[in-house]
Image: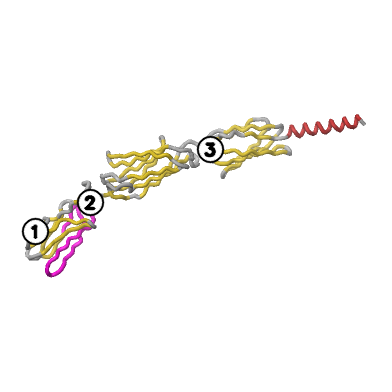
């Protein structure tokens, strides 16, 4: 009987030892980074299959238990929650690990609007999304530099990203032109163009350049905004002549920096000029003259 029990015990011990030898385990580091090599330790004996399941990615690898498995950086592209599963013999085991985004390598930069008047406070907005080389959103706070320049005039502002997003509001410059709006992180930069145009006319003035029996020809001085930028050609300037017979109105477009209009001759008229909400000087024809 003792021999029989000893034989049975030996069989059980051998079976347990065999099962233990076949058991597969996997150990993964908890500081993995997208785009960097990853070393995975396997435990056990025999052949097994390793699965790495992540966001939009599955990596499958045949392994020999007990060996260290290296996953190349270009294979580990997706940041987020991953699961490592090892299957060998009749056993399997899994572990959860996290892959962090890599260093900033790409920027998505939105600038609004594309066209603004000069010298307007807080009128330009810039929003930047920070990504690594595999387009994972970099959640770590990152310093993003915003630069807005027109010619030799430039202004810079640095913002810290929050959950991968950095933003800034900027005033338009005093000089008209194509403003270069740049967002940069280290050596990575993205450029957008914001067209800055002249603001409303300033010090709008007109004068009579010709007067005949039938008509009066008027012309403005060169039209500029309050910071000295020429108002774009095509801008409407309105000339209004008022006398005892009624009102005559001429809408003229700025051409080569000035606007001209021809109005009917009058013995006693008041002539005004305006562009948008901006009023210019006033002329009197045939009577007292003011504002000229």
Q: Residue at x 87, y 31 (%)?
A: 7
Pointer 2: what residue?
231
Judged left or right of residue 220, residue 9 is right
Q: Nearer the viewer, mark 3 or mark 2?
A: 3
For the record, the magenta segment spans: 232-260
N-terminal-most mark, 3 or 1:
3
Residue 85 picture location, percent across and down: 65, 39
| Residue 30 visible in rendering | yes
Q: CA distance from mark 2 to mark 1?
A: 28 Å
Above or below for 228 versus 24: below
* Quarter occupied by the N terminus: top right
Q: Secondary structure at mark 2?
A: loop
Q: CA distance from mark 3 to mark 1?
A: 77 Å
Pointer 1: what residue?
289
Pointer 3: what residue?
100
Residue 46 picture location, percent across and down: 71, 33
Q: Residue at x 28, y 44 (%)?
A: 173
Judged left or right of residue 241, residue 58 is right
Above or below for 11 versus 180: above
| Residue 214 visible in rendering | no
Residue 140 picture location, percent across and down: 48, 38
* Quarter occupied by the C terminus: bottom left
N-terminal-most mark, 3 or 2:
3
Residue 247 falls within the magenta-colored stretch: yes
Asked whether the beta carbons under mark 3 and mark 2 sit within 8 Å of each other, the answer is no
Q: Nearer the viewer, mark 3 or mark 1?
A: 1
N-terminal-most mark, 2 or 1:
2
When asked about the image quadrant of residue 206, the answer is: bottom left
Q: Which residue is more in the foreground, 61 or 40?
A: 40
Q: Residues within 10 Å of mark 2 (few under 14, many from 20)?
A: many
Q: Secondary structure at mark 3?
A: strand
């Amino acid at each position: 009987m003792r021999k029989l029990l000893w034989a049975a015990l030996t069989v059980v011990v051998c079976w347990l030892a065999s099962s233990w030898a076949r058991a597969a385990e996997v150990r993964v580091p908890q500081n993995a980074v997208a785009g960097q090599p990853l070393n995975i330790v396997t435990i056990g004996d025999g052949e097994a299959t390793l699965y790495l399941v992540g966001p939009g990615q599955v990596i499958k690898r045949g392994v020999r238990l007990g060996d260290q498995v290296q996953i190349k950086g270009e294979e580990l592209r997706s940041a987020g929650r991953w699961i490592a599963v090892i299957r060998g013999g009749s056993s399997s085991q899994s572990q959860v690990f996290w892959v962090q985004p890599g260093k900033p390598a790409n920027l998505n930069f939105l600038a609004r609007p594309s066209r603004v008047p000069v010298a307007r406070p807080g009128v330009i907005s810039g929003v930047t999304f920070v990504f690594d080389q595999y387009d994972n959103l970099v959640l770590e706070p990152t310093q993003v530099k915003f630069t807005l320049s027109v010619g030799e005039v430039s202004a810079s502002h640095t913002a810290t990203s929050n959950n991968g997003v950095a933003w800034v509001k900027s005033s338009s410059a005093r000089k008209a032109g194509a403003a270069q709006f740049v967002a940069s992180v280290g050596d990575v930069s993205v450029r957008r163009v914001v067209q800055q145009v002249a603001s409303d006319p300033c010090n709008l003035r007109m004068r009579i350049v010709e007067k005949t029996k039938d008509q009066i020809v008027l012309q403005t001085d060169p039209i500029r905004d309050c910071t000295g930028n020429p108002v774009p050609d095509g801008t409407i300037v309105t000339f209004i002549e008022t006398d005892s017979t009624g009102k005559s109105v001429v809408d003229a477009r700025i051409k080569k920096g000035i606007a001209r209009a021809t109005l009917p001759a009058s013995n006693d008229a008041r002539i005004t000029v305006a562009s948008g909400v901006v009023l210019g000087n006033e002329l009197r024809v045939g009577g007292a003259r003011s504002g000229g």
